[in-house]
Amino acid sequence: MIERTHKALIFTVAFILAIGLLAAKSILFRQHPDYSAEAQRRKKERTARLLDWQSKPTLPILSPQLEHAVETLLATDSCMETPPTSIPVALSELTQMQLRDLQAAVKGILTAYATNTAEAVMAYMDERDEVPAPHRTPVLKDILVKGNRITPTALNVKNDKDIFVTFWNVVKCDSHWSAVLQDTGCIRVWRTSKPFAHDVMQSLGTTDNVVFQAIATYPHNFIPKSAPMEALLTSGPILMADVKVVIQYDKRLLNEPRPHYIRFWYDPCGNRWHPLALAVILTVDRHYPSILF
């Protein structure tokens, strides 16, 4: 009798726990962010943006018409907010030299990554007066060695440039950049005294990331040959530019359109725009391209 009572008690407790677990799951299911009003609003906005991008004409990045497309892109400055604590700068305030070099910097980076070779990227960075950053070389070496892709001995005789090229080729970096969507990008120019502040660094790409909730950022593997940005800050706020380009990927990534945000800073001594940061919004597929920036 006692044994039956114990069994009944155990069964009752187990039953109550099971019911409680199901109730908890039901509550969590209803409260899951994916089913909230905000998540539903973002889902609709994501769908709307993807449909809008699919309706836009595309231009192959390696097309002779790219220069005109970049000029049109850099004439639009209304689709991004300026970072926190920054000072907005109107496009009309840029000199013709600053604007022409910014056009060259944007066209050049698109062409280099669409060409999709380490040599093309290296040539672009050299044109921007940048060299591989020595502090990034050990990081690239460590990834190659720990991944058993190459022996430490083979890397010891290579300089910073060789390590960059070796990493690109061994890892098989691939941007998948194929075409730009026309009438979708823009530029925002601004000044700041704190380009490396956390909220400023985190601001790149927020316009689309608030909707898609998925972003990939790439560390910059190069530094200026001459004056670093920090040296220019002693003279006052530095001139910056954020460029948004919606890029269509190649067939291997199903021609997916993704917004790319590229941040540049201006060196008045060399009259040159330098790339600083790259952020990619992951719109449909969460796979992000393996590239060195």
Image (cartoon, rainbow, N blue to C red):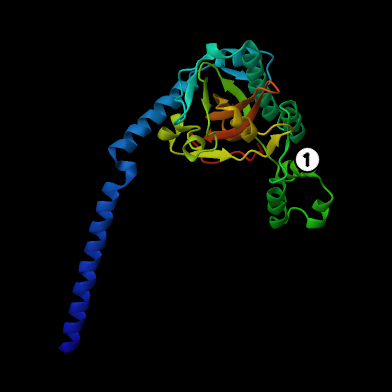
Q: Position of residue 50 (x, y in %)?
A: 45, 27
| Residue 82 point in image, percent of width and height | 46, 26
Residue 129 is left or right of residue 25, and the answer is right
Q: Which of 191 and 32 is in front in this view?
A: 191
Can I make out residue 251 in this image?
Answer: no
Viewer can see residue 215: yes
Q: Which residue occupies 25% across, 59% down?
A: 22
Q: Which of the 4 image quarters holds residue 134?
A: top right
Would you say 11 lies left or right of 246 here?
Answer: left
Q: Which amino acid does label 1 sit on?
A: Lys
Q: What element carries label 1?
A: helix
10 Å crowding of disc 1: few (<14), some (14-19), many (20+): some
Identify the image quadrant of the N terminus: bottom left
- Between 91 and 43, the one lying in front of the other is 91
Where's residue 67, x and y in %? Answer: 65, 14
Residue at position x 66%, y 26% from top? 109
Q: In which quarter of the image is residue 133?
A: top right
**Residue 31 percent location from the top left of the image:** 27, 47
Horizontal arrangement in the rendering, residue 95 relative to residue 31 (left or right): right
Which quarter of the rendering shows the C terminus?
top right
Vertical position of residue 258 compared to residue 8: above or below: above
Residue projecting furthest to the front:
235
Total labels: the figure holds 1
Mark 1 = which residue? 161
Left or right of 9 on screen, residue 286: right
Say which of 264 and 179 sits in front. 264
